[in-house]
Amino acid sequence: MKLLGQVAALAVVIAAATAVATLAGAANLGTALTFGQIGFVIALAVLLLKR
């Protein structure tokens, strides 16, 4: 997977995790973005370990 594809995948993960947290009833956007960051870190770790 090329660098641009990896960056795009990370952006999609952060947006998807934030959207899921918002739809699941997160108290506010800050809380939802926290879950987005957690998803980002997990996806980044997976990409780094696959290398």
Image: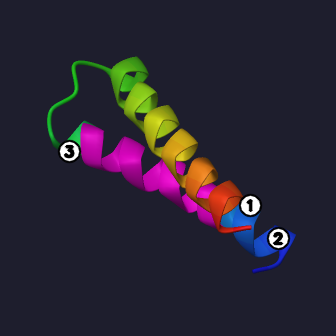
Q: Is residue 43 above or below residue 6?
A: above
The one of 22 and 44 positioned closer to us in this rendering: 44
| Position of residue 3 measured from the top left corner of the image (x, y, whole percent) | 84, 69
> Is 18 situated left or right of 6 in this image?
left
Relative horizontal placement of residue 15, taking residue 19 as reference (left or right): right
- Which callout, 1 or 3, points to the residue nearer the camera? 1
Numbered tag placed on residue 41 in the rendering: none
- Labels 1 and 3: the sequence-earlier one: 1
Residue assigned mark 2: 4
Which residue type does callout 2 highlight? Leu
Tell me where residue 35 appears, x and y as whole percent: 38, 33
Q: Image quadrant of residue 40?
A: top right
Q: Is residue 35 left or right of residue 12?
A: left
Residue hosting label 1: 7
Q: Which residue is mark 3?
A: 23
Q: Residues within 10 Å of mark 3 (few under 14, many from 20)?
A: few
Q: Secondary structure at mark 1?
A: helix
Question: Magenta includes 4?
Answer: no
Residue closest to the eye, 3 or 16? 3
What is the span of residues highlighted in magenta in the rendered image?
Answer: 9-21
Residue drawn at 82 percent across, 70 percent down: 4
Q: CA distance from mark 1 to mark 2?
A: 5 Å
Along the viewing direction, whichever of 22 and 41 lies nearer the viewer: 41
